[in-house]
Image: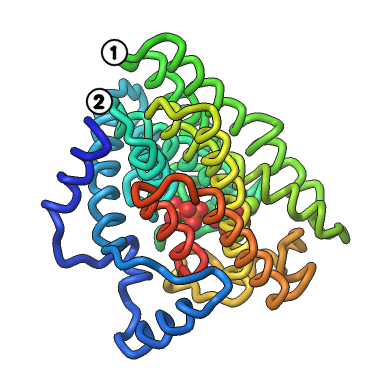
Amino acid sequence: MTGESINAEVFSAASALSAVNGSWAREKPNRRARRERREKNSLVGARLPMDIKTYLSEKKKLIDAELQAILASEDMPVESLAEGAHRAVLPGGKRIRPILTLASFEAVGGDCPQIVRIASCVELIHSFSLVHDDLPAMDNSDLRRGLPTVHKVVGEGMAVLVGDMLLALPFQTLAELPGVEDDKRNRLIGELARACGSSGLAGGQALDLESEQKSVTEATARDIARRKTGALIEASVALGAIAGDASEETFQKLKEYGSSVGLAFQVTDDLLDAEGEQEILGKPVRADEEKGKAAYPSLVGGKRARQVAEELTRQAIGCLTDLGEKAQPLREIAHLLLRRKG
Ligand code: IPE
Ligand code: IPE
Ligand code: MG
Ligand code: MG
Ligand code: MG
């Protein structure tokens, strides 16, 4: 599938939508007009017209169908393992990471029939990370995407194994991708693996646990966010660029974009925990304060946290200057992530 053909498919299937999780679609018209006026003059800059909600919604459909197909082809010998895996993956969230992979692929004008499968691998890693993050031994959370967390449904031991399975599955999927040259496959696997290990997710989650109830610096909070969340978002963008045969220079620019958007994403997640609504988020709020997490708003205050997220978003968009109109979805996504409510 080419970047162009994904776009054609996406836009021809345009439907009245409730955007991703509905949280961006719920905005009232007068509020939207005010926000758009504000954004036009804001630091982050003016937005070009584009139906980004349709874009997101249709990409989400592609990813949802692919994830369903990947899980359907798995041999799961225990019913609760299968139930847990389906619970972890299918009542999906925003799918923002695989959408970033697709948008990055399009930004470099890629041509790779396996791109939706490659993008779905990123979401499997994200799903694994949420199952483990919610466990009693970690954040001890009972609610995810508006539903009981996986360990509440299948038990803690089985939830650990669901996570293990969802961590292995994307690497198996990438290793078995048909029609992809070995060099590209190795780069895809390497990039994703690095995001999961100690320089990424596992290291960030370890620092996150280690920092509970301690006073940490903003630099430490940034390092935690960069590893536990930023690394996978950066890898999501990188995978699209690798699959699309980006030049080294463009690849580095896209990684920089991913790194800034990834960090901004966690700062906003921390802000939403401190100020958001459980009903929209589908997960508990005020949990970071309760657990004494090294979260941005409690460390530096909401105002400074918002400034940090906005500055990172501006930096991210600045990385796309040479990519022109094809990178417009990446710009729009960065804007949306900054003002999301869910
Ligand atoms: C939540 O990620 C966990 C973080 C890394 C902050 P998302 O906000 O992308 O969660 P879903 O997938 O949309 O539910
Ligand atoms: C996300 O951090 C870390 C992961 C890598 C899953 P949080 O612990 O803040 O994520 P939520 O708020 O539970 O989604
Ligand atoms: Mg956590
Ligand atoms: Mg958590
Ligand atoms: Mg959080």
Q: Amino acid at mark 2?
A: Pro
Which mark identifies residue 179?
A: 1
Who is closer to the viewer here, 278 or 315? 315
* 128, above or below 111, in the image: below
Q: Which part of the image, by quadrant, shows the C terminus?
A: bottom left
Of helix, strand and loop, which one carries label 1?
loop
Q: Is residue 174 left or right of residue 207?
A: left
* 44, above or below 35, in the image: above
Q: Which part of the image, by quadrant, shows the N terminus?
A: top left
Who is closer to the viewer here, 82 or 278? 278
Q: Residue furthest top?
A: 182
The image shows residue 107 at horizontal and vertical percentages of 38, 42
Q: Is residue 209 at all visible to an observer of this figure?
A: yes
Q: Is residue 134 at all visible to an observer of this figure?
A: no
From mark 1 to mark 2, how far is it between C-alphas?
8 Å
Q: Residue furthest left?
A: 12
How many discs appear? 2
Of helix, strand and loop, which one carries label 2?
loop
The image shows residue 139 at horizontal and vertical percentages of 64, 53
Who is closer to the viewer here, 85 or 230? 230
The image shows residue 50 at horizontal and vertical percentages of 29, 63
At horizontal 40% and vertical 49% (from top left) the residue drawn is 324
* 122, above or below 224, in the image: above
Dot 1 and dot 2 residues touching (CB under 8 Å): yes
* 184, above or below 265, in the image: above
At horizontal 33% and vertical 90% (from top left) the residue drawn is 30
The image shows residue 244 at horizontal and vertical percentages of 37, 29
* Labels 1 and 2: the sequence-earlier one: 2
Mark 2 = which residue? 113
CA neighbours of label 1 inside 10 A, class few (<14), some (14 to 19), many (20+) = few
At horizontal 54% and vertical 75% (from top left) the residue drawn is 276
At horizontal 70% and vertical 42% (from top left) the residue drawn is 204
